[in-house]
Structure formats: C-alpha cells, structure tokens
Image (cartoon, rainbow, N blue to C red):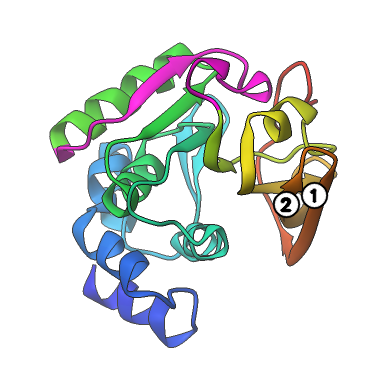
C-alpha cells in the first residue's frame, strides 16, 4: 500500500495531508473481491460485480482533492459501490456521510466492507440521481458514475457555497466537473479533465 500512496503523491494526485492520511488509513484490500486482493494496491479500476467497478485510486484522489473536504462536512455520495470511497470520505470528514446505491447486493457488500474496516456510513438503496432530501442540504456531493448532465435535484440539495463533483458527458467517456453553488440560481463549474466511469442510471441519469 505504501508504494501506491508514494505513486499518488509523486504524480500529485494526492496534494493535501487529509487525503494522504485517508489513503494511509483505509485499506483498499478490504473493499475488493477476494480473487482480486493481489491487485488491490494497483492504480487501476477493478470489477466488483454487476457491471460496476471500484475506481482507480488516482481518480478517487483527484475527486477528493477537488471537493476540498473538511472535518465536519456533511457529504452525500451517489454510487456506493464497494464502500471504499465512502470510507475515505468518512476518514476525512467524520461520520456525517450518506451514500446511495441502486443495486441491493452491492449495498450489502459495501455495508460489510465498511463494518469490518470500522467506518459508520449510512447506506441507502435507491435512485441516486434523486439524492437524499432527508439530510439535505449537503456541504459536498460526489457522484461516482457518468451523467449526461448535472442532475438538478442534486444541485438543489447542495448548500450555498457547497461543491458537487460529477463526471458529465457520454456514457463511459466524460469530463470530471466540479460545480460550486454560488446562489440558488448560479453555479460555477470547473473542468478537471477527461475520465471514464460507468453510467449513472436513474430518473435524471441514463
């Protein structure tokens, strides 16, 4: 794991002490299928079943750094997957992390992974494009699947001054966008470059 973290720091994927500490404390090996444990510390996406993946560590680091996560932030994640991303976020911000997964079997996989690694994240099963109004507004929202556009519902559930990180574009090939909510009628977007993600399925997705 040390070699992976050194790689992420060398190429400036990890820039902050908080993200570095999260990667040091959360063992990726606990969040991949057993038959892929020998590849857990490679900087590549890995399959986790149901046509879903655990993202490459470098891509996760880019997203976490772009969000500028702070201790005490309330965070909504769309696409729980294996729970790895949620664990990293929880390590940085604390226990105010909520995650939505549309595939029940993956939600269960993530719950088990988070439990054995010691992180408390509230996992919900449902359409992530609709967010989770029950705990809104959020300081930060992170979407781990590609959408044709930024779901309006997620913007509404973001605090003024909050940030939303989401891949936007075509299925699988898109741009990583961070949208900062300036006011109820204005958002400021920044493009962090091309990326590849599984499609965001739902009412405001594909």
Q: Tell me which corner region of the image, top left, top right, bottom left or bottom right, holds residue 2.
A: bottom left
128, 53: nearer the viewer: 128
The residue most toward the bottom is: 10
Location of the C terminus (image quadrant): top right
Q: Where is residue 72 in the image (x, y as percent from the top left)?
A: 34, 47
- Label 1, secondary structure: give it: strand
Q: Position of residue 175 (x, y in %)?
A: 77, 57
Instruction: Give the labeled residue for mark 2.
Output: 179
139, 119: nearer the viewer: 139
Q: Residue at image x 54%, y 61%?
A: 59
Q: In this view, does 200 lie above or below 174?
A: above
Range shown magenta? 117-136
Tell me, for residue 82, which label it has, or none: none
**Is residue 27 toward the left or the right of residue 139 in the image?**
left
Q: Residue at image x 51%, y 40%?
A: 53
Q: Nearer the viewer, mark 2 or mark 1?
A: 1
Mark 1 surroundings: few (<14), some (14-19) or many (≥20) residues within 10 A: some
102, 138: nearer the viewer: 138
| 129 inside magenta stretch | yes
Instruction: Give the labeled residue for mark 1.
Output: 187
Q: Do the residues labelled 2 and 1 touch (CB within 8 Å)?
A: yes
Q: Position of residue 77 (x, y in %)?
A: 50, 35
**Is residue 172 toward the left or the right of residue 138 in the image?**
right
| 67 inside magenta stretch | no
Disc nearer the start of the sequence (2/1) = 2
Q: Residue at image x 34%, y 35%?
A: 96
């Amino acid at each position: 794991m040390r070699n992976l973290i050194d790689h992420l720091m060398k190429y400036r994927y990890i820039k902050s002490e908080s993200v570095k500490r999260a990667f040091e404390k959360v063992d990726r090996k606990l969040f991949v299928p057993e038959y892929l444990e020998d590849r857990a510390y490679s900087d590549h996406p890995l399959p986790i079943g149901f046509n879903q993946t655990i993202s490459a560590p470098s891509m996760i680091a880019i997203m976490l750094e772009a969000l500028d996560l702070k201790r005490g932030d309330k965070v909504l994640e769309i696409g729980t997957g294996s729970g790895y991303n949620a664990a990293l976020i929880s390590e940085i911000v604390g226990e105010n992390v909520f995650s939505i997964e549309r595939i029940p079997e993956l939600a269960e996989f993530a719950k088990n992974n988070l439990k054995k690694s010691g992180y408390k994240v509230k996992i919900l099963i449902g359409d992530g494009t609709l967010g989770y109004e029950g705990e809104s507004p959020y300081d930060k929202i992170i979407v781990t699947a590609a959408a044709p556009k930024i779901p309006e519902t997620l913007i509404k559930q973001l605090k003024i001054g909050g940030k939303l990180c989401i891949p936007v574009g075509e299925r699988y090939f898109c741009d990583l966008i961070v949208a900062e909510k300036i006011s109820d009628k204005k958002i400021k977007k920044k493009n962090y470059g091309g990326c590849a993600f599984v499609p965001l399925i739902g009412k405001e997705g594909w």
